[in-house]
Image: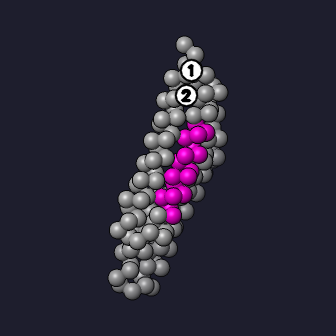
Amino acid sequence: MNPSIRTALIAAGLILGGAVLLRLWAHTQPLASQAEITQRGINVLIALMVILNANTAAKQIRAMPRCDPALEQAARRFTSFALVIGGALYALAWLIAPLNWAFPLSITALGGATVAGVVRCLTLWSRRPA
């Protein structure tokens, strides 16, 4: 089996298994906190997938036909680093912030990381040789 397919199947299994375990654990808690535990847990799983994908993207080397490979790789690494930090802050917001603050904080963290990556890519792209 192709290693990337195997990795994707393992990641999907971990997500589904984590969601099932989270749901089973939530049923042992008081009724008022079941929905909150599930919501927080699912968002932490989403953050972990963002971190995993961003970390993987930084390690892929592909030559772009119309770009300087060094600039392209620098943009990819910076964007991946920003998304890993943004994903970690996203997870942290869902783990420790009050529920009414978790969503705005997490979106701000991940959105800020995305904007930083896009700005860096545009900056490097504008410096490319003609």
- Quarter placement of the C terminus: top right
Whether residue 17 can be seen here:
yes
Q: Are marks 2 and 1 in contact (CB under 8 Å)?
A: yes
Whether residue 42 can be seen here:
no
The three-letter amino acid code for the residue at tag 2 is Leu
Q: Tell me which segment is drawn in magenta.
A: 76-92
Percent of width and height locating residue 79: 55, 41
Q: Residues within 10 Å of mark 2 (few under 14, many from 20)?
A: some
Callout 2 secondary element: helix
Disc on res. 3: none
Disc on res. 124: 2
Q: Is residue 88 magenta?
A: yes
Q: Residues within 10 Å of mark 1 (few under 14, many from 20)?
A: few
Residue shown at the point (46%, 53%) measured from the top left: 109
Q: Give the vertical position of 106 relative to 59 (above or below).
A: below
Q: Is residue 69 left or right of residue 111?
A: right
Q: Give the vertical position of 130 relative to 74 (above or below).
A: above
Question: Whole-Å distance between the Cαs marked 2 and 1?
Answer: 7 Å
Percent of width and height locating residue 13: 53, 61
Residue shown at the point (56%, 20%) measured from the top left: 128
Residue situated in front as seen by the camera: 70 or 15: 70
Residue shown at the point (46%, 51%) measured from the top left: 110
Percent of width and height locating residue 105: 42, 59
**Principal SS element in the magenta part?**
helix
Percent of width and height locating residue 23: 44, 74
**Residue wearing tag 1:** 128
Residue situated in front as seen by the camera: 37 or 99: 99
